[in-house]
Amino acid sequence: MNIPTKRLSLKLLCLASLPVILMGCGGSSSETYPANTVKEESLGVIDARQITLGGLMGGGSTYTVVDWGDGTTEEVNGGGQRSHSYEGSYSGDISLTTHCYAPCNTTIDISGNVTIDTSGLANTSPSRLSVSGVTAFTGSLSNLPRSINDLAISAESLEGNLADLPPNLTSLILRNDGNEKISGSIASLPSSIEFLELYSTEYFIGELADLPSSVKSVHLSRNTLSGRLSELNRSLVSVYIYNVTLKEQGDNLYDLPPNLTSLGLDKWTVTGDISALPRTLKHLDIIDGNAVYGTISELPASLTSLTLGNGFNLTGEYSQLPRKLTSLSLGQDVMVGGHMEDLPNTLTSFTWYDAVSPTQPVTKLPNGLRSVRLFSKTETFTSDNVNAVLNALDVNGLSSDNTYGDLSVTLAGDSMEAATEQGTVDSLTNKGWTVDVKR
């Protein structure tokens, strides 16, 4: 039997003083609770033998303890309702206390059609703040709560200096297009940062050597920082540097940190034998501005994704590619020979971008492919090439039952010779694939 209480509904919420904020449970409100306690409520029961409580909250980083008042307590780790029966008639209080697992961390995620100023965070103490897709996020970096460890901001109109950031950050993602109002020295970044992503370093002062020694993963987009790869922290495991314009650095692959698992370089001149790449690499993305040479067999066997752009004087055969690859993109000057049926069976994505056309007829492709893209500005692919690929995909390439539902075959190019076998295109389309062929 459901017995009415003095309060008909119960909602356990983490408190916040900001609009359009989804806030994970953790002690950040105007009220003060004991350590790791988010919310406390008491329900007065008039007379009951059985009580059912609905609207209980729990799960994720929180749990609720229900004290039924007769010496029985129950820990609720998921939402929904709980019932309790008494031996006789009960009058008194039922208390509900919501806790967060230690440490009591609060996350604030701001998004949507809203304008927020950093001063609105004055009464909060989050450990993580994420801002993206808002109308505007304004104010000074100096107003951000000092409690933040994980900060991700994608917004304009912010101002301040890198030295104004919370002092104990371990992760920082700052995408502020142009950074016109954010300045400062890279050397002033918190010394605790382990993950760093900066979109546009145009207004920042410093060199690669000034990055915090604590950083394990660094992503610099629209990078204008100077320096050499040899100056990077040797303990880095992930490096992505995408420049605005080509930098003639003269770096060698031997200059890279030795234990990298991910590497991406664009418009950053690097030379050397491909054999000098760290053997620990799983993701390799080197696009424009390099002069790397060697044979495909010298690539790290651990690679799962590989993008080789313009500038590679790289030769070899499909059979020599790392056998764990799931994503492969080949650019201009990459000379791959042999039979394409020797591509790794693990491939799910394959792109030719002005790469040299296959030297052998295409008769078979990996049957796990979900995306195939051919793009050429130099008529690399003739209609025979295109039709051979389409036939291979139709007959023994992409899975015939289209179980993924989002398979896409794109064959395009400014001056590529048009495909001619409409029947093959129709066959693929009838299987549910999207086939976009230049005609």
Image (cartoon, grey):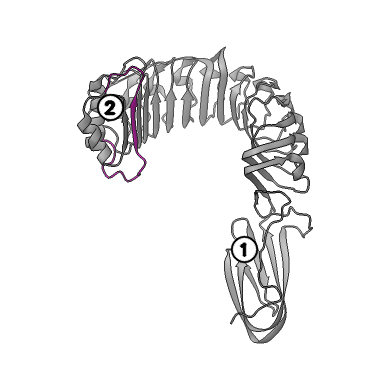
**Residue 175 occupies which quadrant of the picture?**
top right
Q: Residues within 10 Å of mark 1 (few under 14, many from 20)?
A: some
| Magenta extent | 397-418
Left or right: residue 369 compared with residue 270: left
In this orientation, which residue lies closer to the viewer: 3 or 251? 3
Tell me the amino acid under the disc marked 2. Met
> x%, y% of residue 292?
45, 15
Q: Earlier in the sequence, mark 1 or mark 2?
A: 1
Task: State left or right for residue 102 relative to residue 251.
Answer: right
Residue 373 highlighted magenta (yes or no): no
In what element is the residue under mark 1? Answer: loop
According to the picture, the residue beneath numbered tag 2 turns out to be: 340
Disc 1 marks which amino acid? Met
The residue at 26%/25% (across/down) is: 386
Q: Which structural element holds mark 2? A: helix
Q: Position of residue 140 (x, y in %)?
A: 76, 34
Dot 2 crowding, Cα within 10 Å, few <14, some 14–19, many 20+? many
Q: Dot 1 corresponds to which residue?
A: 57
Residue at x 43% of width, y 31% of height: 305
The span from disc 1 to disc 2 (Cα, nearest Å) is 55 Å
Which residue: 66% across, 49% down? 21
The dominant secondary structure in magenta is loop
Residue 130, relative to residue 332: is it above or below?
Answer: below
Quadrant where the N terminus sits is: bottom right
Quarter of the image that includes the C terminus: top left
Decide: is 12 above or below 44. above
- Image vertical order of residue 152 relative to residue 33, above or below: above
- Res 339 visible: no
